[in-house]
Amino acid sequence: MENNVIIICPSWEDRSLLGFKRDCEDVKADKVIALRKEHPINETEILTCVEKITEICSKQSIVFKELMWRDNPIENSGDLNSFINELEQNTVVHIDITTMPRDIIWTLLFFLNQRSNKVLIRYYQPNSYHDTWLSKEPYSPRLLLKHSGIIELGKPQCVVIITGFDEERTRQIVSKFEPQKVVLCVQKGEQYNNTQRNEASLHESICRSVGVTDVSPFEIDCYGTDFGEDIIDGVLSSLSDYNVILASFGPKPSAIGVYKAYQRHTEIALCYVPCKEYNKDYCQGIGDLLVMRYK
């Protein structure tokens, strides 16, 4: 008989708690693991969400455990590895990535790839995003622990970006690594005013303003059944003459497409750019659920 574990990152966003309630309706969970950043932005609202999740688990006799995510990648990896090694082989892992930071997603998948457990990805779209800013003041780009790539001397550098609504993240990563080439994978479609807020030409101008003249845009659908994996894999396959750094700033499902493609190109580096500030009204409501069988 299978056991079911739900892994979540509680957030102040509506869809965090609403999505968890739906998770519990769809999955007969035996255990819930809440990964929570230490000293997060909007901490009071997040703690309220954690309290409500704890109450739901108590009422449904679900074991609840909380893991703190600190600003220490080595310590975090050790904690996650220990937790995953405790999973029984018949445990099905349901990862709700809706409000989960990308470095946590990738670190989870790294350790789960070493196990035989079935893994399912769940993602809830919002009804809408705030119509002005979503995030501000990006930190310096960081390479993911154990995923910093293989640098070959003599090869030029290329940065591949799945773009999003915060164009300053594009500026940060291109300015930091000063690549000879940039590939922009731009989400297609009119959803969430995407064509205006995530216009390819905007990201292209940013790249050119910091001195990159070789800029290639591609369309991608991160809400498709493969979460953009095929397009990302095709782009990476075409860049064998470069040292490649890959970053995902677009729709959250792209983090899964990125990691699945990365597994066939482990010579590349994975990069993430957290921000110092997120809008408390980042998004509203809860929309469609996307589910993928990861393994």
Image: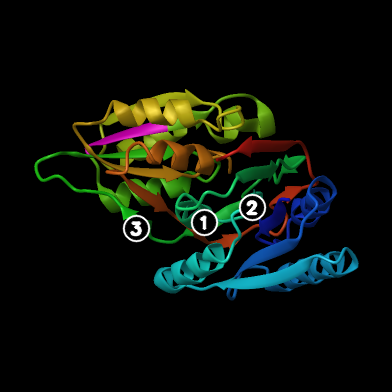
Comparing 174 with 16, the one in front is: 16
User: Any mark on residue 90, and which?
Assistant: 2
Residue positioned most to the left: 154
Give the quarter of the figure containing the C terminus: top right
Q: Is residue 181 magenta?
A: yes
**Which stretch is magenta?**
180-184
Tell me where residue 101 appears, x and y as whole percent: 56, 56
Tell me where residue 74 appears, x and y as whole percent: 40, 71
Q: Earlier in the sequence, mark 1 or mark 3?
A: 1
User: Any mark on residue 108, and which?
Assistant: 1
Residue 201 makes an appearance in the image: no
User: Any mark on residue 146, and which?
Assistant: 3
Q: Identity of the amino acid at label 3?
A: Lys
Mark 2 → mark 1, Cα distance in angstroms: 18 Å
Residue positioned most to the right: 59
Comparing 171 with 77, the one in front is: 77
Mark 1 → mark 3, Cα distance in angstroms: 12 Å
